[in-house]
Image (cartoon, helix red, strand yellow):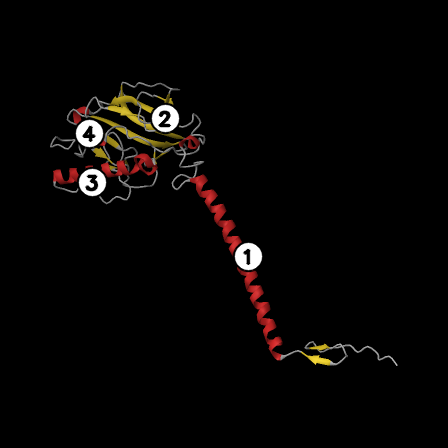
Amino acid sequence: MEQPAIENTNLGASVSKDGAMQTASPQTNQLLPWIIGCIVVLIVVVIAVVAIILSSGRDDKNSSNNGALNPGYTNAADPDLITLDPNAIPLIKSMPADLSLMPITNEKFGEYDRPYFDYGFQVEASSAAPARKNPQPTFILPMGTKVRALIDGVVVGVPKLYSNDYSIHMATDENSQYIIETEHVINPLVKTGDKVKAGDIIAEVSDYDAHNYSGYGLVEIGILKGGNPPSHICPFLYLDSSIKDQTETALREFYQKWNTFKGKQTYDTSLQTPGCLIIEEVEG
């Protein structure tokens, strides 16, 4: 007579061909959880590695699009792409003149007796104006010194100033909110709408206030940010890599030479960014 089927409820047993019950070895039962655990850990590790790779790819893409100093740049390494973004602060590719021309002499240079004024220098109150921080680095240079364009771009204005000299305004785009100023110049060689390259001669240093600077002229540079109220940004924070090291070295050397010549600490030689006493924006 045929035997009725018997349900096997022992998970640790198996049935042989002749129907005899066989029990799994204790070693097999002990290894099974360990094997499952290893598989789970391996899956988790693979998922984590894939997530890190994908995240790194996104960060690299964002980094190449933004630039270290200027999140408005399309590509901080490519000037041609930079100029396509009117909301980007353009990188400065030229100083207004050779910085070695700044005089080191016993002649008196105005109230503060210095031939260069850093961005953020504290100007004391006077009958003409309240106390303020200097928004535009100021260079005292020999009369006749040619002034050069700071950036590649277009001239967006050449206004005549109260001092009977001029300011040349440049931008990478006519709609840009950032204006690159070369202020207090005479004999301008450009007009609104002209396209210029960094290093092109655009004017001469102004004779404004020359009587206070022993016959020397002056020129100021600035990055003007539009707004209400407008503000200025330290231009030395936005030097193109082609002139950054050279310019910072020239400023540090000038600081040291002037301090040594005068026998006192007129300039701070420890500035992280030479030319910027502060890095905050200056209103106005």
Residue 130 horizontal/vertical position (percent): 27, 34
Q: Nearer the viewer, mark 4 or mark 2?
A: 4
- Kindly report the distance in space between the C-alpha atoms of the residues bearing marks 1 and 2: 51 Å
Mark drawn on residue 145? none
Q: Neighbour class for label 3 at 10 Å: few (<14), some, many (≥20)?
A: many
State yes or no: discs 3 and 2 in contact (Cβ < 8 Å).
no
Residue placed most toward the observer, 214 or 237: 237
Residue drawn at x 58%, y 69% is 35
Dot 2: what SS? Answer: strand
**Distance of label 3 from label 2 (alpha carbons):** 30 Å
Within 10 Å of disc 4 (Cα), the crowding (few <14, some 14-19, many 20+) is: few
Q: Nearer the viewer, mark 4 or mark 3?
A: 4
Residue corresponding to mark 2: 170
- Helix or strand or loop: what does disc 1 sit on? helix
Measure how far apart labels 4 and 2 are at the Cα level: 24 Å
- The type of residue carrying mark 1 is Ile
The answer to which image quadrant residue 191 occupies is top left
Q: Is residue 217 visible?
A: yes
Residue receiving disc 3: 267
Vertical placement of residue 162 versus 11, above or below? above
Write the residue at 59% across / 76% down. 30
- Judged left or right of residue 66, residue 200 is left
Left or right of 75 on screen, residue 223: left
At mark 3, the secondary structure is loop
| Other-residue count near label 2 (Cα within 10 Å), few / some / many at <14 / 14–19 / ≥20 | many
- Relative placement, left or right, of 144 versus 41 is left
Mark drawn on residue 101: 4
Q: Which residue is mark 1?
A: 47
Q: Are marks 3 and 1 in contact (CB under 8 Å)?
A: no
Residue nearest the viewer, comparing 34 with 152: 34
* 70 is higher (above) or lower (below) than 40: above
